[in-house]
Amino acid sequence: MEIKKVGILGAGTMGAGIAQISAEAGYQVILVDVVADVAANAFKKMQKNWAKAVEKGKKSAEDIEQYNALIAVGTDLDVFAECDMIIEAIIENIDIKKSVFAQLDQVCKPEAILATNTSALSITEIAAATKRPSQVVGMHFFNPVPVMRLVEVIPGTETTEATVQATVDLCKTIKKDPIVAKESPGFIVNRILVPYINEAAIAYQEGVASAEDIDRAMKLGAGMPMGPLALCDLVGIDVVLMICEYYWKEFGDPKYRPSLAFKQKVRAGHLGMKTGKGFFDYSK
Ligand code: CAA
């Protein structure tokens, strides 16, 4: 099936990024968020990113005009009826995802592929909420979406090879490098990256060094592009905490026990860049 129209559900950081690169690749895009302000802010963020690209001479005003003509923003799932592929990028909660996939199954045309950007949850479990598990697939993007090249493509137990191939092809068209991974908590990257971030937060909690010095050490001594605590702020401390808790439950291994620092920051409402404060302060 040729994919022409892409629907994206959830206009947070990830959804907005996916919408942006899909329009840049020439797809018609419908970006939906149940909260109108979130969808509107995502649209503004895209404009900001494109304005920067024009300033740097990387894109022209005509390019931006073309992208804008391809994007529609809404708050209602019904608009996905015409889409060939829907990419869900909502909150990482299995019950909410299952309920949303059951709704998408009702609204979307029978041949449409339903993809989830889940960073750790079971594709098979999400797919089982639909009557088309063979057309449900994991499509895991990385933050910041316009910059990071990888998309992990994860088949569930019922996903067909045709669905995987169509997803891999879409990734290539939107200029990403797909890697197919087996279904397992965290797939490849988060399986390795999240325990690393957790260990940094535990070291911080134990007072091994300040947040600044832990990050500087990993940049200077291990060549990381950014420190683990800044990365945690970028991803969202709430998201990293949820993933640690999920690993602990799924693997039954206490090595995934989350740092207390995550819990304290989440309880205080300091979730990282998105709230202006996390391990570091972004309010200035
Ligand atoms: N949106 C769009 N573009 C962005 C951006 C954003 N949020 N942040 C940076 N960029 C662009 C900049 O505009 C710049 O573009 P040009 O080359 O065209 O000028 C380019 O990226 C480099 O940015 P900077 O010069 O400002 O900064 P940098 O060189 O330090 O790079 C970084 C910033 C790309 C974020 C880099 O530090 C990095 O790669 N960090 C690691 C990020 C990472 O590990 N991401 C994965 C997180 S895990 C995840 O997402 C999965 C999950 O499920 C939790």
Image (cartoon, rainbow, N blue to C red):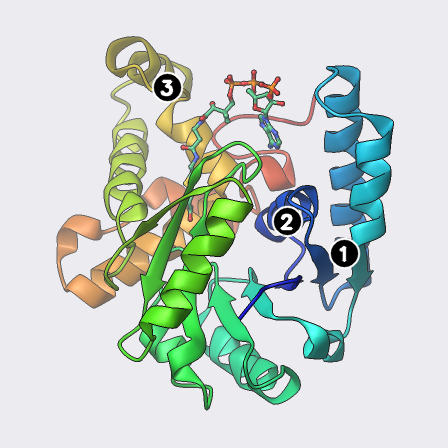
Figure quadrant of residue 177: top left
Q: Is residue 74 left or right of residue 120?
A: right
Question: In the rendered image, which residue does mark 1 sit on?
Answer: 39
The answer to whether mark 1 is within 8 Å of ligand 1 is no
Question: In the rendered image, which residue does mark 2 sit on?
Answer: 22
Figure quadrant of residue 281: top right
Question: In the rendered image, which residue does mark 3 sit on?
Answer: 215
Number of other residues with Cα within 10 Å of mark 1, as a class: few under 14, some 14 to 19, many 20 or more? many
Residue 120 visible, this angle:
no
**Marks 3 and 2: CB-CB under 8 Å?**
no
At label 2, which amino acid type do we have? Ser
In the rendered picture of this protein, how many numbered marks are placed on residues?
3
**Marks 1 and 2: CB-CB under 8 Å?**
no
Q: Nearer the viewer, mark 1 or mark 3?
A: 1
Q: Is residue 205 left or right of residue 112?
A: left
* Circle 2 SS class: helix
Q: Nearer the viewer, mark 1 or mark 2?
A: 2
Please tell me which of labels 1 and 3 falls first in the chain.
1
Please tell me which of labels 3 and 2 falls first in the chain.
2
Number of other residues with Cα within 10 Å of mark 3, as a class: few under 14, some 14 to 19, many 20 or more? many
- Residue 241, x across and y down, in percent: 38, 51
- Residue 212, x across and y down, in percent: 42, 16
Q: Is residue 180 left or right of residue 60?
A: left
Residue furthest to the front in view is 2
* Circle 1 SS class: helix
At label 3, which amino acid type do we have? Asp
Along the line of sight, the residue nearer the viewer: 180 or 125 = 180
Mark 1 → mark 3, Cα distance in angstroms: 33 Å
